Image (cartoon, rainbow, N blue to C red):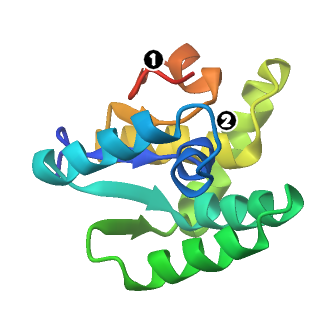
Amino acid sequence: MAMRDNLFIDTGGFYLLMVEKAPQHDKATTALFNQTKRGRIVTSDYVISETATLLVARGYKLQQKKFLNMVRTSEALAIERIGAELFDKTIEFALKHFDQEYSFTDCTSFLLMRKLKIRRVMTTDRHFAEQGFVVEPSVA
């Protein structure tokens, strides 16, 4: 099923949403609010793992707790599991694009977004635009 009006949220997007002093926090929050009227919000289990790790690594332990509670209770957030098949395809993709310095989690996201036909992403990572995705809001 095509998810044309849906928005994928990457680690950078969640970081903007969870850290109030992040440069584009207000813009990201507004974009997320508008998205709830437009379509679903989608992410992956790998992005959730990466976000939880990033928040702690940057000293935002309380934001990590808030993030994990939000993930656990949100009815608006669809969490896609990477699974064995997509994991194997990601290894091939990552090896093929080794020179691009993509993170493994980003590679999973690229393939998942293509599989689900999601074109828009909330992120701070320029690699998504390089892969042809539309970054919203324009924060990358």
Which residue is nearer to you in this view: 54 or 80? Answer: 54
Question: Residue at 54% of width from left, 64% of height from top?
Answer: 82
Q: Is residue 73 placed above or below 102 in the rendered structure?
A: below
**Mark 1, secondary structure of its residue:** loop
Q: Residue furthest left?
A: 37
**Mark 2, secondary structure of its residue:** helix
N-terminal label among 1 and 2:
2
Q: Residue furthest front?
A: 21
Q: Quadrant of residue 4?
A: top left
Q: Position of residue 25 (x, y in %)?
A: 52, 41
Given the image, on which type of amino acid does mark 2 rest?
Phe
Q: Position of residue 98 (x, y in %)?
A: 82, 26
Residue holding disc 1? 132
For label 1, the crowd category at 10 Å Cα-Cα, with few meaning under 14, some 14 to 19 and many 20 or more, is few
Given the image, on which type of amino acid does mark 1 rest?
Gly
Question: Residue at 77% of width from left, 64% of height from top?
Answer: 60
**Drawn side of residue 53 relative to residue 3, left or right:** right
Which residue is nearer to you in this view: 48 or 37? Answer: 37
**Drawn side of residue 32 relative to residue 105, left or right:** left
Quadrant including the C terminus: top right
Residue holding disc 2? 93
